[in-house]
Amino acid sequence: MSMTGPTPVLGVTWNPHELERAELDRLPEWRVLEAAGERSPVWDRVDALAALARHISPDLLDALPALRLVHLPNHGVDGLERPDIVRRLRDRGVQVAAAAQAGPPIAEFVMMCLVALTRRLALTHAAMILQGGDRSAGLRRQRMDGAWGGELQNSHLVVLGYGTIGREVARRASAFGMRVTAVKRRPLGDLRDEPIDACLPSGQIEVALEQADHLVVCVPLSRETERLLDARRLRLLPRGACLVNVARGRVIDERAAFQLVADGHLGGAAFDVWANDEGADGLQPDPAWQHLNVLATPHYAASTREARVRSIRFIADNVQRFRAGATLRNPVELGTR
């Protein structure tokens, strides 16, 4: 969409780092938007908004009369799937896009977790600290019984959700010599250019779980995926399987997963996302995190400097495309999940 008249403005709802500012400066004008009660005349020129989903409110949208594009800097769009937001965006013809540039660091995080869990890294490290090398709780003598874990090579990884992140996970898992099965709502027919060995429809999730040595969860949060992995389905995983969740906390029954680790059914679990990680009180410590084969991190898998710079560069490029009337990259259709 070409613009004439006053210079259009990209509104930003956070205070950018200097590295982000360098990318934003490629645009004619951008501004950090303060609270709606402090709006200034520049708000009338905001045609594009770069914002985290939780920053977007009906009041903010109503205060931006020229808005035609909302651009998220991350992958998840579930925070926008609120009726009052979707209705306003649709009624005004506002387009939505997501940068989705954090696939590489998230995939690296997943592989780090799989290696740490399968090799019992935290348990072995603790034993070294407390009891010393060869005397580490008899672990060396028990290694043939699996006390020191096993290998990823030749194991079967199921990737639940095969979008940008799932594909990056599959690439790295394939390089580790793992056999990879993706579970996708609309399975792929041609796998020749894909880093996976099989692709199953979501209706066959239980078949996939029963065959998995390890499970990585990458699905977006939706009505269909909320609590998709309940206690019954988690028990379908073979004994010793490891679980990594980089999707949304509400996709999995966390308590059931922790209990299966404590009972020895699951070999380990890594969580970077939590059911209550955006609650008013923040993420509160949980005794379950103290288990030596549970890895708990504060939603940081995507949070590298490189990924953030890529995201802002992507947004700046997409805003330029939007203003030129070109096709948006990574468009999002709300209300379809």
Image (tube, grey):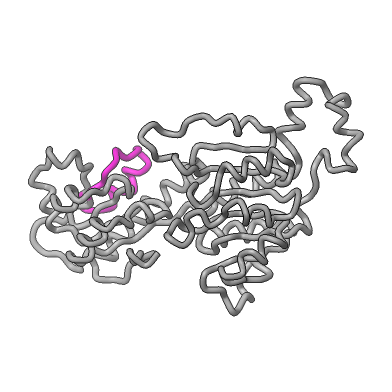
Residue 165 is a magenta residue? no
| Front residue of this view, candidates 253 and 70 | 253
Instruction: Name the residue at 26% across, 49% down.
Output: 56
Left/right placement of residue 30 relative to residue 18 reads left
User: What quarter of the picture does the N terminus occupy?
Assistant: bottom left
Q: Which residues are magenta?
A: 11-29
Left/right placement of residue 309 relative to residue 164 reads left
| Front residue of this view, candidates 281 and 184 | 281
Left/right placement of residue 143 relative to residue 246 reads right
Considering every residue shown, the one lying at the far bottom of the view is 189
Looking at the picture, how far across and down is residue 115, in whole percent? Answer: 70, 45
**Up-down relation of residue 139 to residue 223 (above or below):** above
Looking at the picture, how far across and down is residue 18, in whole percent? Answer: 34, 38
Instruction: Name the residue at 60% across, 33% down.
Output: 289
User: What quarter of the picture does the C terminus occupy?
Assistant: bottom left
- Residue 233 image-quadrant placement: bottom right
Instruction: Name the residue at 41% across, 54% down.
Output: 76
Looking at the picture, how far across and down is residue 75, in whole percent? Answer: 43, 55
Instruction: Name the residue at 28% across, 59% down.
Output: 319
**Up-down relation of residue 262 to residue 210 (above or below):** above
